[in-house]
Amino acid sequence: MAGGQEHWDGVYGARSEDELTWFEATPALSLELVRAHIHPDEPFIDIGAGASRLVDVLLEEGFGPLTVLDLSDAALAVSRQRLGARGDDVAWIEADITRWEPDRTYAVWHDRAVFHFLTAAEDRAGYARALSAALRPGGIAIIATFADDGPEKCSGLPVVRYAPEALGQELERLLPGRFETLDARRHMHITPKGNRQSFQYSVFRKTDG
């Protein structure tokens, strides 16, 4: 995976979470999509969550069990410190998603801005293997990436940009016949410095067993 643990530990160690370009005080669109596709008592995993505050809101709303996965221990430490004792109700996993082997299944897989960093075909294939293994039949994958008119780099690393339909095509290529598209939309993220970043959010349902 481009930009290993050392890179991302450095990113999270250099700036506070609210200075990072992807920071959202309230992850509104992610929350909308999660609420629409999961019952509060169903298992949920946030892939590459970093210091995202999505888990905070889901805990407050009674969702669980919740799992947060990230390559960077420094990123996970930010969330653990912020949540304090509430974080005891979260399963924290430090892992490279392209090599991760899940030991349970989930109802919802949420990924905001991991997949677009996978510029190598073998990394996308590894991600797809983890997704297929981790998501139960009928489960939902919410995947957000930079859109085709979004930034070409993030945190000094190149990305692969996707139009909403292109992400669906890539998932079909990686996992043929296993997912159907339920929703695909564009979204404009405003960074803490006021810059605009074009994203796409796609929602898929796993159709196979």
Image (cartoon, rainbow, N blue to C red):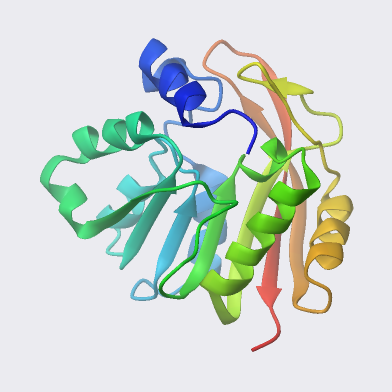
Q: Is residue 13 visible?
A: yes
Residue 33 spot, x, y in % from top left? 57, 59
Q: Is residue 187 visible?
A: no
Residue at the (46%, 24%) spot, across then down: 6
Residue 185 spot, x, y in % from top left? 76, 50
Residue at the (79%, 23%) spot, across then down: 152
Q: Quadrant of the C terminus?
A: bottom right
| Most distant residue in the bottom direction | 209
Residue at the (54%, 67%) spot, across then down: 36
Residue 41 spot, x, y in % from top left? 33, 75
152 or 72, which is in the foreground? Answer: 72
Q: Is 128 situated above or below 191? A: below
The image quarter in which residue 182 lies: bottom right
Q: On the picture, is 198 further left or further right than 89?
A: right
Residue 180 spot, x, y in % from top left? 77, 74
Q: On the picture, is 16 further left or further right than 97?
A: left
The image quarter in which residue 179 lies: bottom right
| Most distant residue in the left direction | 85
Q: Quadrant of the N terminus?
A: top right
The image quarter in which residue 77 lies: top left
Q: Is 48 situated above or below 183? A: above
72 or 81, which is in the foreground? Answer: 72
Residue at the (77%, 41%) spot, across then down: 120
Q: Is 132 situated above or below 73? A: below
Q: On the picture, is 66 further left or further right than 205?
A: left
